[in-house]
Amino acid sequence: MSTLYPAFLNSRDKIVGSTLALSSFVHKCSSIQIQIANSFFKGGSYSHNQHRFYFKGDENNSKISILNLNLFRDGQTQISKRRYSNKHGSKELSSQVNEYLDAGSSKDELFSRILKEIETSGKRTDSVEELKKLLKDRINELVDSELIKTLQKPKSRKMTNSIKPIVKPPKISTNPFNLYCKDQITALFDENPQFQLDISSQVKILLEKWRTLSDEEKKPFKEKAQERKSILIKEAEQWWENVDPNLVKLENIRRKNINVERKESGKPLLREIKNPFAPKSLPTAYAIFVKDVYSLFLNVGPAERMKSIAQKWNHLSQDEKQKYKERFLESKKEHSD
DNA sequence: CGCGCTAAAGTGCATTTTGA
DNA sequence: TCAAAATGCACTTTAGCGCG
């Protein structure tokens, strides 16, 4: 098979260096199949059509790899290689592929057309722009094709089932080390715009550096973090003041709906959102009691501790309980004044 | 919801990959 | 096309414990 394209483009129009070039991929595989998946998606505020092609090959005669060619109706292109390591066994992969294969025979024509095009073009280019144009031309041709027109329509989703958040509260937390990372990584890019960032190893390096910094050297980052945090808090307060409470309710409904699926698949659940600045309710009589006697139970573990405190509370006489109830009423009175 | 504490989960950074 | 997952680490926040 002829050499095709020098590299993959990712969605940001950068050549992905670490990924195999399509050409070498094609060469490595003893056989190549091209499959098509038709997908229409609607998520939140946008709606678009995406046509996805799978280039399947038994790379090195062992691992199965798949290339994604995503064609969007608006002319965007995305090529990426999907690697299946330990996480996705080849079994799982092939069933996934077969599913798409059976999706419709009318796609065969388009498959072969693309395959032929790739085989016979023999074009190669080192220019990203040129590569983009090549793909774009083909897409323009494709989006007008009968096949694309017959693709199924997007399923509409209720807002409360959407993957897109209805409202998104601003995040407040930050820390000195994060700011240090940002600072250092920005500097690396400034020094060398071609710098290839491997974030995980980079953070390791930065962490070691961070540990060697003196308190004096850490100070500006700590101060900056404090500063940033107070700004974030102010912004968050503003946000919560202005947000429509009905949308917050809807967002929590959406999260509950999503959590049904997440729970089934064992994924961590989305938390409900709530206003962290809302006034807290007063400690109850029992809460006051816990605070009073807590230090007496430090010798046992936290769970055991609370059980013991509860037991002690239950053994209190009515008079003693009454004292705590009065303390609660007093604080309530003070609060209302 | 609130008490105090701990274990566990979440958060930031940047980026690519994957999913919808 | 956007959003989430994944990546690693320190730091930060929160769930959970029981009761009213």
Image (cartoon, coloured by chain):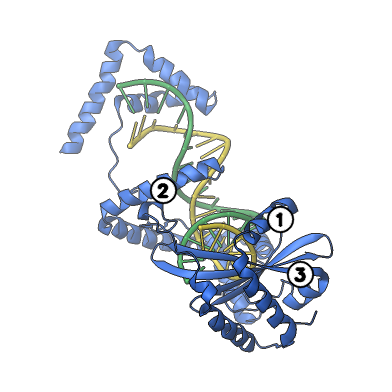
Chain colours: A blue, B yellow, C green
Which mark is first along the chain, 3 or 2? 3
In the displayed structure, would residue B5 be above or below residue A324?
Answer: below
Locate residue A187: give its quadrant. Answer: bottom right
**Residue type, mark 3 in image:** Ile
Which numbered tag is attached to residue A255?
Answer: 2
A310 sits left or right of A317 in the view? right
Residue appearing at x 30%, y 16% in the figure:
A321
**Residue type, mark 2 in image:** Arg
Which mark is first along the chain, 1 or 2? 1
Q: Secondary structure at mark 2?
A: helix
Residue appearing at x 38%, y 57% in the figure:
A168
In front: mark 2 or mark 1? Answer: 1
> Label 2, label 3: how many angstroms apart (C-alpha)?
42 Å
In front: mark 2 or mark 3? Answer: 3
Which numbered tag is attached to residue A32?
Answer: 3
Q: Secondary structure at mark 3?
A: strand
Where residue A152 appears, x then y in whole percent?
A: 48, 64
Q: Quadrant of the N terminus of chain A?
A: bottom right
In the displayed structure, would residue A295 be above or below residue A131?
Answer: above
Mark 1, other Cα within 10 Å: few <14 / some 14–19 / many ≥20: few
Locate residue A324: give its quadrant. Answer: top left
In the displayed structure, would residue A77 be above or below residue A218?
Answer: below
**Residue type, mark 1 in image:** Ser
Residue appearing at x 40%, y 52% in the figure:
A161
A159 sits left or right of A188 in the view? left
Chain letter for mark 3: A
- What residue would you read off at disc 1? A94
Mark 3, other Cα within 10 Å: few <14 / some 14–19 / many ≥20: some
> Label 2, label 1: how many angstroms apart (C-alpha)?
33 Å
Residue closest to the far left: A337
